[in-house]
Image (cartoon, rainbow, N blue to C red):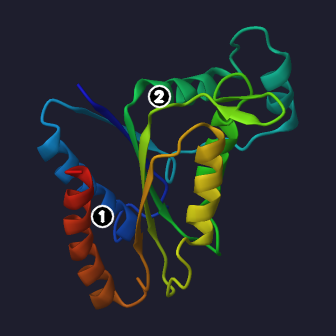
């Protein structure tokens, strides 16, 4: 049985293109994986604490889990327990939402999701990941700043099998709706591969 971990990071619960795209993706994924499980991790509207000095130091000094490390350990366990990952992410001020950055600050941990031996060696292997990003402006590069940032983080944790779906120019609602409809076909094609 396959498990998909869906990470939503939009501040909006309604009228969010990244959330809508994510819901469409999950619908298509469930059709192809009828006996599957979808686990949701909400970081857009559920508070994820920002990394502070005390917690950062505990990453390196704690011999075992502690109350301070509980959330980090829980988030990391979710990543290891899933087979595939879906990240829905809007671009805010040319970057990912701060809540999603806070999430990754808690899961990128030496000895947990990567180890360092002269270079970073990712410990999350064989995880297919889908990034559904949205932005109000026109996308001018192959990957947006958000997608490039996520790619680097995921690669350092050992995730290389990444698929990108972008919704740009969402400021134009009719254009965004057309793109969203086209993405459903893209999802189906990718998932059937």
Question: Few, some or many C-alpha atoms within 10 Å of disc 1 (few <14, some 14-19, many ≥20)?
Answer: some
Give the labeled residue for mark 2: 78
- The quarter of the displayed image where residue 12 is located: bottom left
- Residue drawn at 83 percent across, 22 percent down: 60
User: Which mark sits nearer the N-terminus, 1 or 2?
Assistant: 1
| Residue located 43% across and 80% down the image | 168
Circle 2 Cα neighbour tier, 10 Å, few/some/many (<14 / 14–19 / ≥20): some
Q: Can residue 123 be seen in this view?
A: yes
Q: What's the distance in space between the residues labelled 1 and 2, CA to CA?
A: 23 Å
Secondary structure state at the residue bearing disc 2: helix
Single out the residue that lies furthest toward the top.
63
- Indicate the quadrant where residue 111 lies: top right
The residue at 45%/66% (across/down) is 133
x and y, in percent, of residue 110 in the image:
74, 27
Give the side of residue 25 with respect to residue 71, left or right: left
Q: Position of residue 188 (x, y in %)?
A: 19, 58
Q: Nearer the viewer's eye, disc 1 or disc 2?
A: 2
- Left or right: where 135 falls relative to 66: left
The reply to whether discs 1 and 2 touch (Cβ–Cβ < 8 Å) is no
Vertical order, 76 against 90 (above or below)? above
Residue 102 image label: none
**Place of residue 67 in the rendered image (x, y in percent of width and height, measured from the top left):** 68, 17
Q: Which residue is drawn at 23% across and 75% down?
A: 182
Residue 16 at least partly seen: no
- 153 and 56: which is toward the camera: 153
Residue nearer the viewer, 36 or 151: 151
Task: Give the structural element (helix, strand or loop) at label 1.
Answer: helix
Looking at the image, residue 76 sits to the left or right of residue 108; the answer is left
Q: Residue tagged by mark 1?
A: 20
Where residue 129 sits: x, y (%)? 43, 47
Screen quadrant of the N terminus: top left
């Amino acid at each position: 049985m396959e498990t998909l971990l869906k990470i939503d990071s939009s501040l909006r619960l309604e009228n969010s293109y990244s959330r809508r795209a994510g819901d469409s993706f999950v619908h298509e994924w469930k059709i192809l994986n009828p006996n599957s499980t979808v686990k949701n991790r909400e970081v857009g509207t559920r508070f994820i604490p920002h990394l502070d000095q005390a917690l950062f130091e505990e990453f390196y000094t704690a011999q075992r889990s502690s109350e301070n490390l509980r959330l980090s350990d829980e988030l990391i366990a979710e990543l290891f327990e899933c087979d595939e990952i879906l990240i829905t992410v809007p671009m805010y001020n040319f970057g990912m939402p701060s809540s999603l950055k806070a999430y990754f600050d808690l899961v990128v941990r030496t000895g947990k999701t990567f180890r360092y031996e002269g270079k970073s060696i990712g410990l999350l292997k064989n995880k297919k990941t889908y990034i559904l990003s949205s932005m109000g402006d026109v996308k001018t590069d192959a990957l947006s700043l958000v997608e490039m940032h996520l790619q680097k983080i995921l690669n350092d944790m050992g995730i290389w099998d990444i698929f990108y779906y972008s919704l740009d120019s969402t400021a134009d609602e009719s254009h965004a709706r057309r793109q969203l409809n086209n993405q459903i076909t893209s999802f189906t094609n990718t998932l059937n591969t």
